[in-house]
Amino acid sequence: MDATAQKPQGRRIVWLNVMTVLSAAVLIGAEVFGAAFAAGWAFANLFHLGPYGVHIVQGLLFLCGIAVMTRFVHNARRIEPFTEG
């Protein structure tokens, strides 16, 4: 029997990478969603869509913003992996 049994190596979370991606996501998310709401308001007023049109256009651009942020986090995880080992 070997007294120096090795414990299995699991995956470790790399907190520096997690915080980097999270910080960038917060910053970029503020820009993306702020632009979505502002553009929704601007386009709805430009085309005289009324108060309901503003909310509909903002909602559509908000969904586009969710898609942009999802792709950003997915690509950022490839560059800055959250786990190692």
Image: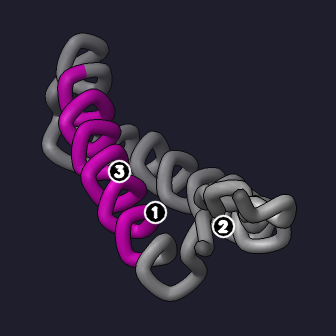
Q: Nearer the viewer, mark 1 or mark 3?
A: 1
Q: Nearer the viewer, mark 3 or mark 2?
A: 2
Q: Residue 15: tell me if it is visible.
A: no
Which of the labelled discs sits on residue 21, or is there none?
2
Residues in magenta? Answer: 56-75
Pointer 1: what residue? 73
Whole-percent x, y for residue 80 in the image: 59, 81
In the structure shown, which secondary structural element does the residue marked by tag 1 occupy? helix
> Looking at the rendering, in which quadrant would you find the C terminus?
bottom right
Whole-percent x, y for residue 60 in the image: 19, 36
For this view, does 42 lie left or right of residue 17? Answer: left
Mark 1 vs 2, N-terminal side:
2
Q: Is residue 26 magenta?
A: no
> What's the amino acid at mark 3?
Gly
In the displayed structure, would residue 56 be above or below residue 13? Answer: above
Report the predominant secondary structure element of the magenta stretch.
helix
Residue in the picture at 24% in, 49% down: 64
Q: Residue 32: tell me if it is visible.
A: yes
Residue in the picture at 39% in, 39% down: 41
Residue in the picture at 84% in, 65% down: 4
> What's the amino acid at mark 1?
Val
Mark 1 vs 3, N-terminal side:
3
Res 22 → quadrant: bottom right
Front residue of 34 and 16: 16
Mark 3 vs 2, N-terminal side:
2
In the displayed structure, would residue 21 be above or below residue 10? Answer: below
Crowding near the residue tagged with mark 1, few <14, some 14–19, many ≥20 C-alpha atoms within 10 Å: some
In the structure shown, which secondary structural element does the residue marked by tag 2 occupy? helix
Pointer 3: what residue? 65
Whole-percent x, y for residue 74 in the image: 37, 65
